[in-house]
Image: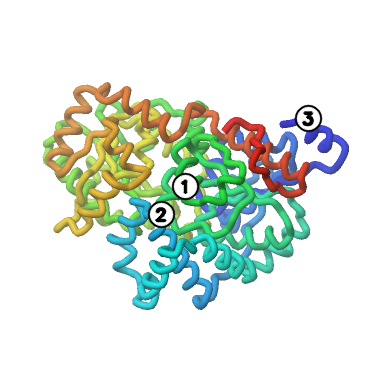
Amino acid sequence: MNNSLKIEIGAKKRPGVLILSTSPLIDRVVLYTDTVRRLSANFDVTIWASSKKNAENDDMWEKSPARVEPFPEILPFREFPYNYLRRMNEFVWDYRFPVPSRISMRRHVRDKKQRLLIKSLKLPAFLLAMCRLESELEDRTEKLLLGYRRSPEAEMRLKELGPNVIISTGPFQFEQPAIFSAARSLGIPTLAYVPSWDNITTKNRMVFDYDGYIVWSDQNKKELLKYYPKSQNKPVYKTGAPQFDIFFKKKFYQSREEFCRGQSLDPDVPIIVYAIGSPNFLCEYPGAVALAERITKGELGNVQLIVRPHPMHDRGELQKKFIKFASSVKLQQTADADLSLTERSQDETQIIEWINTFRHADVVVNLSSTVTIDAAIFDKPVINLDFDPQPGRPDQLLIRDINHKWNHFKPIAESGAVWLVENIDQMVTAIRGYLDDPSLHREKRREIVEYVCGQNVGDCGSQLAGAIEDFAGRSLRDRIYRPRESEEPAMAY
């Protein structure tokens, strides 16, 4: 932190930082990395967390050095004209700057679900794009959205709290942009943290113009500057991926014997982990069922299978699918099925299970997810599906696009770090190959970890805190950061 900020802190009331969290993945960062601990040395840190509304999480949040409060109530936009204009804006930008991931998503997923009225916006959007009016449209859209009060509660609480900086960790989500609107009306600087490597190229467009941005990697920074031109005149901090810092905290480590005892597994038998992604996007469980059947038949010899649902979307619906394999398959429960997504979080017991599941896996199977990085950090061989495991393969073209066209995952799928398989037989062959030689593709695994997480892997939470400190210092000095073209942020990006 710069000296001028230290002097101001010593002479006056400590500046305040407000962090927004509406996802279990961000709860991981603010609870279990060094981010909040480091910030608390010089700032009064407040966290508005949606999971705080669940009283069962109180013990978990009480361990935080920050003041933790429930997230304010958020109202949706009215359909017309607000949501229509948002969709129109997205179409215009997609025509002007076609992003392979978004074009694929639109073709294979969104176009099949969109109402005719929304689809009718494509023609005027195309004409606006031809006239290069995307920036003008986005400016008007932002102005309209800022005028819609979605959270009177947030406005009231922000006036009482008076933070110097707000960190939005979900700028692509439903809830947090409403806090941005309230903050802008009060003149509070906002820093947008892009919480995952795929968000810029796959999520709905950020309409609001934040005062600064935090991304994981060089690649994310390039994407941000290209697809969000206004960010070119703002500080953009590169911190790595803080959510993986937890993998390096040995206090969460269990011995293989201890882990297996808790999972009812044999520590002397190889463990295959099949990690399933969001069921809201792809139906992946048939692949895990097919593998469980092969294991039950003895085709892979004496092995054990852990099926791990997505921690944000586990609703217990897989129980019936795997009950017949109970003797050789362990189905984990990663969340309370009765809770809404925003009320979920992960206590230390769940964090320990998550970490040690990948520490003690012998092979990890998944379909194009961040789990690939989870496994690679622990140097575990990764098998990636290059096919749709559903009967009839209705999503085959989409899955091929994800692996070979999508901006964030194509470099991983084609890196040589993972074993791509096109059917269950190839999956079985790949598992056997990795069990025989776990060192296969080791160097490439290290490369993809650095590609996604940067060189500070294990210390990214501290880097995140440093970015917030630097931005807060600038905001305190200048009231709100308005960079000049010639000015370079003091922190190394």
- Alpha carbon distance from label 1 to label 2: 9 Å
**Residue at 54% from the left image edge and 33% from the top image edge:** 460
Residue beneath label 3, please?
A: 3
How would you rate the neighbour count of disc 3 (Cα within 10 Å): few for under 14, some for 14-19, many for 20 or more? few
**Residue at 39% from the left image edge and 35% from the top image edge:** 374
The quadrant holding residue 426 is top left
- Alpha carbon distance from label 2 to label 3: 42 Å
Q: What label does residue 226 carry, if any?
A: 1
Work out whether mark 2 precedes mark 3 in sequence or the reverse, and give the earlier one.
3
Mark 1–mark 2 CB contact (< 8 Å): yes
Q: Dividing the image into 4 quarters, which one contains the N terminus? A: top right
Q: Nearer the viewer, mark 2 or mark 3?
A: 2
Work out whether mark 1 precedes mark 2 in sequence or the reverse, and give the earlier one.
2
Mark 2–mark 3 CB contact (< 8 Å): no
Work out whether mark 1 precedes mark 3 in sequence or the reverse, and give the earlier one.
3
- Alpha carbon distance from label 1 to label 3: 34 Å
Residue type indicated by callout 3: Asn
| Secondary structure state at the residue bearing disc 3 | helix
Q: What label does residue 97 carry, if any?
A: 2
Residue 404 appears in the rendering: yes
How would you rate the neighbour count of disc 1 (Cα within 10 Å): few for under 14, some for 14-19, many for 20 or more? few
**Residue at 29% from the left image edge and 42% from the top image edge:** 366
Return the x and y of residue 255 as percentages of the image width and height.
41, 25
Q: Nearer the viewer, mark 1 or mark 3?
A: 1
